[in-house]
Image: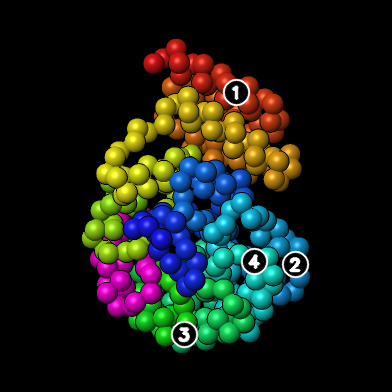
Amino acid sequence: MNDMSVKIGGVNIPGRTALAPLAGITDRSFRMLCRQQGASFAVTEMVSAKGLADGSERSNQYLDFEADEFPISAQLFGSEPEVMAEGARVVAERNPDIIDINCGCPVKKIVTRNAGAALLNTPERLGQIIAAMVRAVDIPVTLKIRSGWSQANQAVAVARIAEDSGAAAIAVHGRTREAKFGGRADWDIIAEVKNAVSIPVIGNGDVRGPEAAKEIMQKTGCDLVMVGRWAIGNPWLFKRMEVFLNRGELLPEPTHGDRLEMAVHHLKASIAFKGLRYGVLEMRRHLAAYIKGVPGAARYRRTLMTEDDPNHLMDLLGQIKAEGRRDT
């Protein structure tokens, strides 16, 4: 194991960067792109433990990872220890490296089920969930939390309970549930968690580039850096972070042409994995990110966000690329 690797349980993570779980974003096509561009591991979209326990086909569709993605972490959400344990057993049959618990989702339909960030308000129940899952499977169980519900004063207590209950690592997003994605992430709370536990701590929040990745690691002592929203339309971010953390070298940002070529590649991969309808529909947020700031993109944005024909989309991306070359 080299100096840039970390172990989560018995799983060797070969670098220092991870792709965060994002509902509707971190499907297999995007995870693969980020891994190819340097992410050391990725986390799936959150999956309902109850859906898995009940045999829900839709929930199972989120677990579409393959061996070429390892190490891979599969994230579950739920609020009942027995159900979460059964969901973990179902997930374990697909042989992920890690199973993660969602304790950070701020969305109302999740927290009203006492899941996601709502688990921060019931740390004893969370401890029971972790312990039940650890007993149920032979692979590491981790969790991803926010700094707190409405105040950043719950993370340390939750982290200690998590470690005592058998968690192998904890990711901390330095925002409260109430803050959602607004304001600045509080990295101090990540440092407090790191000082409170002996398991690996993963820092998350406002890591927009290589310099920020180095800064969060220096300020908090976190073992790994996790990026979600800032990787959308920018999978190169992971390689740039890994190289900067490892060698201090700042690789150039992708050109407009690089971004448009990646958009086409990503679109094709999305269709291959999800089929024509959903492969196109669920690319729209990604496409909007790929073309952001590209010369000539504004006039095509509306069409790009509503077009269903992949061939037309690829033609549009080609036109944007050609206009960008003329404008630069």
Identify the mark at residue 165; answer none if there is no mark. Answer: 3
Where's the N terminus, which quadrant?
bottom left
- In the rendered structure, the answer to whether residue 112 lies left or right of residue 309 reads left
The answer to whether residue 163 of the structure is visible from this angle is: yes
**Separation of disc 4 and disc 1 at Cα?**
40 Å
Three-letter code, disc 4: Asn
Secondary structure under the numbered disc 2 in the rendered image: loop
Q: Looking at the image, which residue is at 47% across and 63% down?
A: 12
- In the rendered structure, the answer to whether residue 281 lies left or right of residue 184 reads right
**Separation of disc 3 and disc 2 at Cα?**
28 Å
Q: Is residue 183 magenta?
A: yes
The single residue placed furthest to the top in the displayed view is 326
| Upstream in sequence: badge 1 or badge 2 | 2
Look at the picture and state if 50 lies above or below 18. below
Secondary structure under the numbered disc 3 in the rendered image: loop
Secondary structure under the numbered disc 1 in the rendered image: helix
| Residue to which mark 4 is pinned | 95
| Upstream in sequence: badge 4 or badge 3 | 4
Q: Nearer the viewer, mark 1 or mark 3?
A: 3
Of residue 204 and residue 114, the one placed in the foreground of this image is 204
The answer to whether residue 305 of the structure is visible from this angle is: no
**Separation of disc 1 and disc 2 at Cα?**
38 Å
Q: Are marks 1 and 3 in contact (CB under 8 Å)?
A: no
Q: Nearer the viewer, mark 4 or mark 3?
A: 4
The residue carrying pointer 1 sits among few (fewer than 14), some (14 to 19) or many (20 or more) residues within 10 Å by Cα, namely some
Residue 271: x %, y % from top left: 69, 40
Identify the mark at residue 56; answer none if there is no mark. Answer: 2
Q: Which residues are magenta?
A: 180-202
Q: Nearer the viewer, mark 3 or mark 2?
A: 3
**Separation of disc 1 and disc 3 at Cα?**
52 Å
Three-letter code, disc 1: Leu
| Residue to which mark 1 is pinned | 316
